[in-house]
Amino acid sequence: DNHDIISLKLYQLTVERTPEEEKRDREVYLPVVDNLKLPGMEAPLEPMSGLALFLIVFFSLVAIVFAIVIGVIVYNKWQEQSRKHFY
């Protein structure tokens, strides 16, 4: 049993309020965002130190060499298995 809401009619009643009530309501209903971080307002990143840059480059090169060695081993195994055998 589905019922679709087609429209809503909302009414705001005008009520006379004292200044104290207005102040209290304004404090309650006005949103305040003191700690909002806007996009693009982040603090700039500090540059990497020489040691961090060296370690990144070093371990990247080690990983590349490791991948090449594994690739050569797999290629050689594939070559051995694909050779025609005459029995």
Image: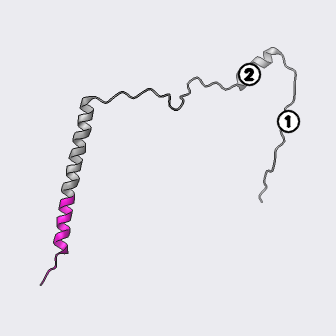
Instruction: Label 2: state its secondary structure.
Output: helix
Instruction: Label 1: state its secondary structure.
Output: loop
Residue sitting at x 87%, y 21%: 16
Q: Say left or right for 82 vs 6.
A: left
Residue 79 falls within the magenta-colored stretch: yes
Q: Rate crowding at label 1 as few (under 14), some (14 to 19) or many (20 or more) other CA atoms within 10 Å.
A: few
Dividing the picture into quadrants, the one containing residue 51 is: top left
Q: Position of residue 4 (x, y in %)?
A: 78, 54
> Where is the N terminus found, in terms of image quarters?
bottom right
**Chain part drawn in magenta:** 71-86
Which dot marks residue 26? 2
Mark closest to the chain's N terminus, 1 or 2 = 1
Residue sitting at x 79%, y 55%: 3
Residue sitting at x 16%, y 75%: 83
Q: Rate crowding at label 2 as few (under 14), some (14 to 19) or many (20 or more) other CA atoms within 10 Å.
A: few
Find disc 1 in the rendering and name its residue.
Answer: 11
Q: Position of residue 49 (x, y in %)?
A: 28, 28
Dividing the picture into quadrants, the one containing residue 22 is: top right
Residue 32 falls within the magenta-colored stretch: no
Residue sitting at x 50%, y 31%: 40
Q: Position of residue 29 (x, y in %)?
A: 72, 26
Asked if residue 71 is positioned above or below residue 31 in the image, the reply reads below
Label 1, label 2: how far apart the Cα atoms are: 19 Å
